[in-house]
Image (cartoon, rainbow, N blue to C red):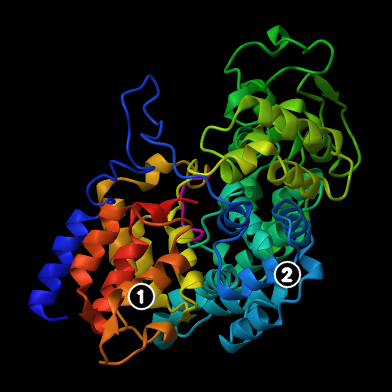
Amino acid sequence: MQNQGRRDFLKTVALTPLALGATKSAFAEKPSKKKDEIAEPAPSVSLDTLAFSRISFGPNSVSEDQYHDLGKSPEKRFEKYVELQLHPEAIADDACLLRIVALNLKTLSQDSKSLWKAHVSDVEALKPEMKKEENKLRQQPAQEVEQAAWVRAIYSERQLNERMAYFWHNHFNVYPWDGKIPATFVQFDRDVIRRHLFGNFREFIEAVTKSPAMLQYLDNFTNQSGNPNENYARELFELHTLGAENYLGTMDRKNVSGFAQGHPIGYVDGDVYEAARCLTGWRMTNGEFEYFEGWHDRFQKIVLGNAIKEYQPEMKDGHDVLDLLANHPGTARFIARKLCRHFVADQPQDSLVEKVAKVFHESRKEKDQIRRTVRAVLLSEEFKQSWGQKVKRPFEHTVSILRASEAEFTPTDAFIRNHERTGERLFSWRTPDGPPDQKEKWLGANALLERWRITNFIFSGQHPEIRIPALEIGKEKINSLVHLAAWEKRLLAFPLSATARGKILEFSGVASDEARLRMSVALLSMSAEAQWR
């Protein structure tokens, strides 16, 4: 980019709604008792737009054509789309699979024993002259899961499946880049998260509890009688099931309302300690789950007002704890609130949460409990009226513009590390709470600057891992108004404000070339309007 062009470009960036704080957009605040209210309501959008921006990671021409083939009535079309996406097994996804195959990711189909041998045992046995390869070999399984996740989010026709994988990975957060965890992360993604994401929650949390990745990350693989480790038990209560909203502190369990009847309204530290005892002996060996009776505390415990008898059959204590948590109404409300926060609004209405929690709780014995719950969220009136209540996180924003621009994209290690500067790298939140699903975390000045930088990287045309054929027009002159109108339709759910459009057109000029068009499209992608979902 020539110096004058760069100066003009940066000047225009400074005048975009996003850089100005988006005072007329979803990023602004108005004087109010609630600091997070939007200054002016975002324009209403169609159900079609909601389907693409919330259920999927954004539209592309293929998904739009397929969507409109579902029917003429917007309501019926939307309902059919929801039902189709809730059954990903019925959606052909060969094109996406071929892209993943082309990446030659060697670990994704391997079993746990093979992964452990290749990426732990064999690595530890490396000769001194090969030690420089150690870190690369250790982390390869986690890196390949990450690469595949990018490809699926951008190219899969099973978009809700990918969004739910994104949701559950953040809910059952594991940081897979340390120690021996990378070797177990393929199994965690493939056999735990993806196998259960529309299934039964009780079965899901048992699969998570037994997964070698989680056993290592939260230390339950060291949990044994006489020296219990409560790390996993605490997060099982606080993050995975009941949530901190049902934590009652250090009070005596007998004073908790409902304790005497075996139905306490919440949990206390004593419940966590006793649950940790129930899970002693749940460990792993060579990358696979193992129950070791010799480590188990076989004596009586009391969890959530229920007596866990002494000398029960193998693993029964742990199963009892998972049963109590999965069946607790507080778990239903907590999971319902997180789903509503992800799909509807940062602060979902209590009435919606209660409706969704009712579906979750009443279907707790069903194999497709989570599918039924997600359906209740997506078909709710609150969902249909929720535009302007969610802002894209960095991964969502990047994927949405790659989808809309129909880019040819390869998730190289260099690109992923570059994208990490936005504040969101997949599977890289160190603490077990997972990344927040509310806009405040993602809208700081530095975060937006990095979001702008990666957007410019994508549209620059200077990086071989990203090609956007629709922008490859050579040095011929173009009609800026016509081209920008086409890209505005591609990238945005509704038209730009006249001021924003004027600034971008002023930058691009009446007639321009490919380089300036690329920069103008990047500006469109960083407008405040492009951040809503």
Q: Which mark is residue 69?
A: 2
Q: Residue at x 71, y 37 (%)?
A: 225
Q: Residues within 10 Å of mark 1 (few under 14, many from 20)?
A: few
Residue 69 shown in magenta = no
**Element type where label 1 sits in the image:** helix
Does residue 423 sit above or below 294 in this rendering?
A: below
Q: Which mark is residue 101?
A: none
Q: Is residue 343 left or right of residue 133?
A: right
Question: 275 or 340, which is in the foreground?
Answer: 340
Q: Earlier in the sequence, mark 2 or mark 1?
A: 2
Question: 68 or 80, which is in the foreground?
Answer: 68
Question: 107 or 16, which is in the foreground?
Answer: 16
Give, as a single range, the part of the protein colored magenta.
424-432
Q: Position of residue 448 (x, y in %)?
A: 30, 53
Residue 428 shown in magenta = yes
Q: Which mark is residue 482?
A: 1
Circles 2 and 1: CB distance less than 8 Å? Answer: no
**Element type where label 2 sits in the image:** loop
**Main SS class of the magenta portion in the image:** loop
